[in-house]
Image (spheres, grey):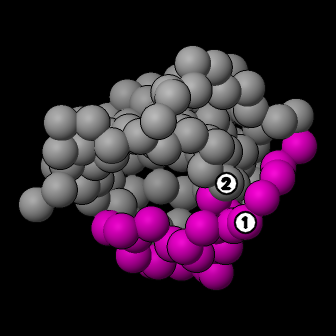
Amino acid sequence: MEQKLLTVFPRQEQGPVLHPHPRGFTVIAGQPVTRTWRYFAKEEEGALLASGLWECTEGTFAFRFQHWEFFHLLSGVLRLTPEGGEPLLLGPGDAATMEVGFSGTWEVVETIRKHFVTRYVAG
């Protein structure tokens, strides 16, 4: 099978919406609704590398990362509080990485959209 060497993300969301809430997501306040569009996925050396677009409406949730992730906020406002740490206010243009085991509280102040790249290891 030939490997696709370039994946261009569409300007508007396309395709099926994946699972309503990611693993490790526990709602604390409000009724946040998430939508995920995965545009790239590849299994490599026992891990799944994936990327796409993620959206979440207003609300607060606890999250414990079971995967590595890089994200870049396209729109919205997020107050991210690492467990035992100080809150960070993130908005359009901000980017971050999170390691497996990172935990904290996400307060979506204004609906967010982000591009993401994740790496899940089976186990």
Q: Who is closer to the viewer here, 108 or 98?
A: 98
Q: Element under label 2?
A: strand
> Which residue is drawn at the image coordinates 18% and 36% (left, top)?
45
Q: Residues within 10 Å of mark 1 (few under 14, many from 20)?
A: few
Decide if residue 4 is on the left or right side of residue 123.
Answer: right
Question: Which stretch appears magenta?
Answer: 12-36
Label 2 sits on what residue type?
Trp
> Which residue is drawn at the image coordinates 88% and 34% (left, top)?
11
The image quarter containing residue 37 is bottom right
Residue projecting furthest to the front: 1
Residue projecting furthest to the right: 12
The image quarter containing residue 35 is bottom right
Magenta-drawn stretch contains 19: yes
Magenta-drawn stretch contains 68: no
Q: Which residue is mark 2?
A: 37
Q: Who is closer to the viewer here, 60 or 10?
A: 10
